Image (cartoon, rainbow, N blue to C red):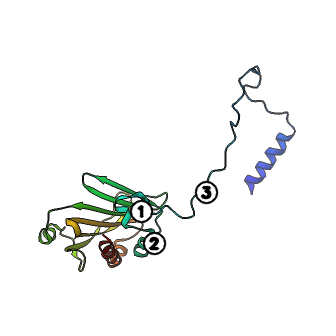
Amino acid sequence: MALAGALLAGAAALSGCARLEHPTANEPKTATPAPVGAGEFEKAPSPSASPTPPSKAGGTCTLLDYASVQAATGTEFQVAAASDNSGAKACALQVLYSDYPSLVLSVIGTKADAKAFGKAAPGDASGVSNLGSAAYSRILAAGDGAGPAVEIAWLGKHQQIVTLRYTYPKDVGAHTARENVGKLADYARKLEAKR
């Protein structure tokens, strides 16, 4: 309220003054006129009512859709980006204006069989049944501005290792990540069935 009063008082004080001159107002009026349309801008387009589907990003993003990801994670993602680097293909989903939460699906070819994949699994991993030839899940600790992450990795069709990682925002605890491993594993099974 005090700010509004100060602004009104300032406007009233200026209303009795002569027009304020621009510092260059006394320069000769021989300048070239501005091009037609200069200073005229169209109204900025509104954000799309629905985000562009992940499949439009190509690559492994073609396996994802926002509705099924939201059902699995509870997060409404709006941005998708695909990458194909050194044989690894990945798709990252994010929300607008924030790095986290995020979901990354990556696929890379391998010569490993189920036994080798199981032996190479991290020490803190737990087995996941009915997913590919072999699969595991694990919880990654929070860090670098991110919360914990749930990682589901499996030896899938076409001799490929597939990894699905959902990273929470920094204010989420590891217990929440642990509670949602089952939902992400179910989603991973659906993804493998689509491949």
Q: Which of marks 2 and 1 is nearer the N terminus?
A: 1
Residue 134: percent from left, percent from top = 19, 74
Mark 2: give few (<14), some (14-19) or many (20+) Cα within 10 Å.
Answer: some
Relative height, residue 54 to residue 71 (above, below): above
Taking 64 as reference, is 15 left or right?
A: right
Given residues 130 and 23, the one toward you in this image is 130
Q: Could you tell me residue 25's position as x and y percent?
A: 76, 26
The three-letter code of the residue at mark 1 reads Ser
Few, some or many C-alpha atoms within 10 Å of disc 3 (few <14, some 14-19, many ≥20)?
A: few
Q: Foreground residue, 138 or 192?
A: 192
**Crowd tier of the residue under label 1, counting other residues whose Cα lies within 10 Å: few below 14, some 14–19, many 20 or above:** some
Mark in front: 2 vs 1: 1
Residue displayed at 30% across by 76% down:
189
Residue of label 2: 67
**The C terminus - image quarter:** bottom left
User: Of residues 8 and 83, which is closer to you in this image?
Assistant: 83
Q: Mark 1 points at which residue?
A: 55
User: Along the horizontal axis of the image, is 36 left or right of 146?
Assistant: right
Q: Earlier in the sequence, mark 3 or mark 2?
A: 3
Which residue in the structure is indicated by mark 3? 46
Which residue is situated farthest in the right direction here?
16
| Residue type, mark 3 in image | Ser
Give the residue type that dot 2 points to: Ala
Work out which quarter of the rendered image holds the N terminus and state it.
bottom right
Name the secondary structure under disc 3: loop
**Location of residue 56 by image quarter:** bottom left
Secondary structure of residue under mark 2: helix
Mark 1 residue element? helix
Q: Position of residue 38 (x, y in %)?
A: 68, 36
Q: In this view, does 116 lie to the left or right of 189?
A: left
